[in-house]
Each structure stands twice: as structure tokens, then as C-alpha cells.
Image (cartoon, rainbow, N blue to C red):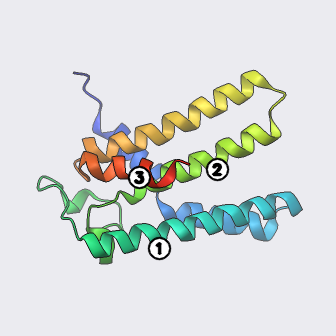
Amino acid sequence: LIKIPKIYLIIFEYVFHGVPWFIISFGCFLFGNKIVSYRSLTFIKGLIIDLITVGLLKYFTRRQRPSLNSEKEMVIGTNIGPDKFSFPSGHSSRAVLISCLLIDIIRQYFSTQKLYSIASIAFFVFLAIGTCLSRILLLRHYLSDVLAVFFFQIK
């Protein structure tokens, strides 16, 4: 078994925290050109739908987080309200959503640059999978919390 330093797992935890992505998306909407503003609306709508869907599922299922989970180590704002519950994983859901949206942009705008496209797509797939695995390895979620995300997100 490969031992992954905890700091790497925590980095994955922060990469797809929701607040920065909302700020980036609103900033792009307000200050970007017409195409960037339009694309950022897709991100904003996706993030809002994701937030509502995950929040409602957590509220109604109320599945407790793994017993070894340390609330002191969790990202600020992820252990209040429905977010204190485990099912489904909000970070994993956001990671898959944002990665899919970014991959869609790469496919559309960089289709002629095959090597760049493939490398970029591989990078975002790596980030999404890394985030999903970090949720389990940091004992924030059960495997089923993360697997459920793929059921809801993948078309």
C-alpha cells in the first residue's frame, strides 16, 4: 500500500472548496468579456444546483460522518448545518462538476491542439479523482458517499 502524506490529501480538500469557485465565477462574470461572462454563468448555475442538491440530500439522509473523522481538522465551514453530514460528498461533487465543465471548455476551444487538450483533460481528471480519494483517505466520507457523486454527475 502506498502511503500518501496527509498534506497532499489536504491540498485536494482545499482545491475544490466551494467559496473560491463562487468568487472566481462571479469575478469572471463581472469582469470577463462576453464569452467568459457567458461561461461563468454556467459555472455559477452549476455550483448553485450542486450546492442545493448536495445540501438537500445531506439534510434528508443525515448520514453521520465516519467515526474516526476529526472535526477540528475539517475545512472551515464544512461542519455546520447539513454540511456536518456525510452523504453525499460535497467536495467530490464539486470536483467532478468543475472538472467536467473545464474539460468541456478545453474540448471546445482547444480541439486543434491535441497534446495540450489531452494533458489538460488528464490534469482535471487527476484533480477530480484525487479529491474523491482524499475524502475517503482523510476519513471525511465513506466510499459510498463519493461513489454516489458519480451517479449524480456523470451524464
Badge 2: residue crowd in 10 Å (few <14, some 14–19, many ≥20)? some
Q: Secondary structure at mark 1?
A: helix
> Contact (CB < 8 A) between labels 1 and 2?
no
Q: At label 1, which amino acid type do we have?
A: Ile
Earlier-in-chain disc, 1 versus 2: 1
Residue 149: which numbered mark, if any?
3
Earlier-in-chain disc, 1 versus 3: 1
Q: Which residue is mark 1?
A: 52
Badge 1: residue crowd in 10 Å (few <14, some 14–19, many ≥20)? few
Residue 53 image position (x, y, % from top left): 45, 69
Residue 101: which numbered mark, if any?
2
Kindly identify the residue that appears in the image at 57 percent across and 38 percent down: 124
Alpha-carbon span between mark 1 and mark 2: 18 Å
Q: Secondary structure at mark 2?
A: helix
Kindly identify the residue that appears in the image at 34 percent across and 49 percent down: 146
> Contact (CB < 8 A) between labels 3 and 2?
no
Quadrant of the image occupied by residue 58: bottom left
- Whether residue 103 appears in this view of the structure is yes
- Whether residue 16 appears in this view of the structure is no
Residue 84 image position (x, y, % from top left): 27, 69
